[in-house]
């Protein structure tokens, strides 16, 4: 009997897709070299993106109105959530799937060849293995520590303030501070995208400097999180999912909630890439080019402008994967809001015209 679906890769996207296909009564073979590995990364996103089928217990913490800093403070009118990674993984149970521990070396039409030279076939094959690193791709990097939660540490979605010890003309990074539980908090210095991205050793030194400047002392025994992954390089289409399928927002690095939200659509073999979604993806990629082109000193000003947009336009740009009208309106309004000196550089980069500039930016946006 032919299997309905083969899913290659059991990260958050592949596991969510396998879970939802099983819920729809499909037969699934899932292939991963380490299918039982635990998830140590921190995944987060926006509450209003979550699908109704997701178990609410997978949410570790919820921030009703997170704060962002550019050159000044902004209250975000949107609820932000941080997942309990272990609970999220366990909630996406794979009971009933055929789990194969092996490495995929080739996908051709409806056939998968493994490192062991075993060949599997199915009615559909979906690649959810993520994106391989390449010097050609912008990457996100981060270095964080998990500390005891303290009332004096304010949760921060983004913090561009310049107290991390970096020189004024150095590529920017900033602080991401979110509670992981009632007792713990992640403090992370992050770089959204760079070719090359900032090294985690640089981010470590900046984080330590920033925390010292705010009176936060580390013991050296805190759990550490290191992050490095491409924010571009995925290919839209029905045969890929998650980061491999271009579900990563190229200007933020988010992909987890978008993949969870689209899992049912892909499970039903309905295209997750209507023409509007492909157009939005192209506009988001243009947005990444614009961010990469900005001089370091202009980045906080840029984000000041973004976070003064109406909440519905912020949401359209950050989460409206198929909302072409909202994405266009957000980008147009943002452009009009920017100070005049920034507009030419943003316009030039968005159109893809080569310009000389640093190509690193910082961000705390994860998941």
Image (cartoon, rainbow, N blue to C red):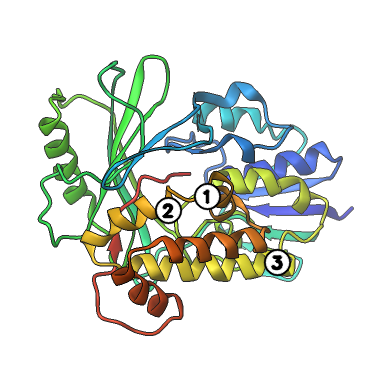
Q: Is residue 284 left or right of residue 325?
A: left
Q: Nearer the viewer, mark 3 or mark 2?
A: 2
Disc 1 to disc 3, how far (Cα)?
A: 18 Å
Residue at position x 14%, y 22% in the image: 219
Q: Earlier in the sequence, mark 3 or mark 2?
A: 3
Q: Earlier in the sequence, mark 2 or mark 1?
A: 2
Q: Which residue is mark 2?
A: 306
Q: Earlier in the sequence, mark 1 or mark 3?
A: 3
Q: Nearer the viewer, residue 356 or 90?
A: 356
Q: Nearer the viewer, mark 1 or mark 3?
A: 1
Q: Nearer the viewer, residue 339 or 318?
A: 339
Q: Which residue is mark 1?
A: 314
Q: Are marks 2 and 1 in contact (CB under 8 Å)?
A: yes
Q: Nearer the viewer, residue 236 or 315?
A: 315
Q: Which residue is mark 3?
A: 276
Q: How many marks?
A: 3
Q: Is residue 267 left or right of residue 359?
A: right
Residue at position x 73%, y 59% in the image: 272
206 above or below 60?
below
Give the residue at the far right of this rendering.
1
SS state under label 1: helix
Q: Nearer the viewer, residue 110 or 292?
A: 292
SS state under label 2: helix
Mark 1: few, some, or many residues within 10 Å (few <14, many ≥20)? Answer: many
């Amino acid at each position: 009997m032919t299997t309905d679906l083969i899913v290659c890769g059991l990260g958050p996207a592949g596991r969510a897709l396998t879970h939802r296909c099983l819920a729809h009564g499909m037969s699934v073979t899932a292939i991963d070299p380490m299918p039982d590995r635990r998830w140590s990364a921190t995944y987060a996103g926006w509450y209003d993106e979550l699908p109704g089928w997701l178990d609410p217990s997978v949410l570790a913490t919820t921030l009703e109105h997170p704060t962002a800093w550019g050159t000044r403070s902004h209250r975000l009118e949107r609820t932000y959530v941080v997942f309990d990674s272990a609970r999220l993984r366990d909630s996406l149970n794979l009971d009933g799937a055929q789990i194969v521990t092996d490495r995929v070396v080739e996908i051709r039409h409806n056939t998968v060849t493994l490192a062991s030279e075993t060949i599997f076939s199915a009615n559909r094959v979906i690649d959810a293995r993520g994106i391989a690193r390449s010097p050609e791709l912008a990457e996100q990097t981060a270095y964080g520590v998990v500390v005891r939660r303290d009332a004096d540490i304010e949760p921060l979605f983004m913090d561009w303030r310049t107290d991390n010890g970096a020189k004024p003309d150095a590529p920017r990074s900033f602080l991401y501070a979110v509670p992981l539980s009632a007792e713990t908090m992640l403090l992370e210095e992050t770089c959204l995208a760079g070719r090359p991205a900032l090294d985690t050793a640089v981010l470590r030194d900046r984080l330590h400097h920033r925390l010292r400047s705010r009176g936060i002392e580390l013991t050296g025994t805190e759990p550490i999180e290191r992050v490095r992954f491409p924010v571009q390089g995925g290919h839209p289409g029905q045969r890929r999912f998650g980061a491999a399928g271009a579900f990563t927002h190229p200007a933020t690095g988010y992909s987890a909630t978008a993949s969870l939200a689209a899992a049912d659509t892909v499970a039903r073999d309905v295209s997750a890439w209507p023409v509007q979604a492909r157009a939005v993806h192209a506009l988001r990629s243009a947005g990444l080019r614009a961010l990469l082109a900005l001089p370091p000193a202009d980045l906080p000003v840029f984000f000041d402008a973004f976070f003064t947009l109406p909440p519905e336009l912020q949401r359209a740009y950050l989460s409206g994967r198929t909302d072409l009208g909202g994405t266009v309106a957000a980008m147009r309004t943002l452009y009009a809001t920017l100070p005049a000196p920034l507009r030419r550089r943003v316009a030039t980069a968005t159109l893809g015209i080569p310009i000389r500039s640093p190509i690193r930016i910082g961000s705390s946006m994860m998941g």
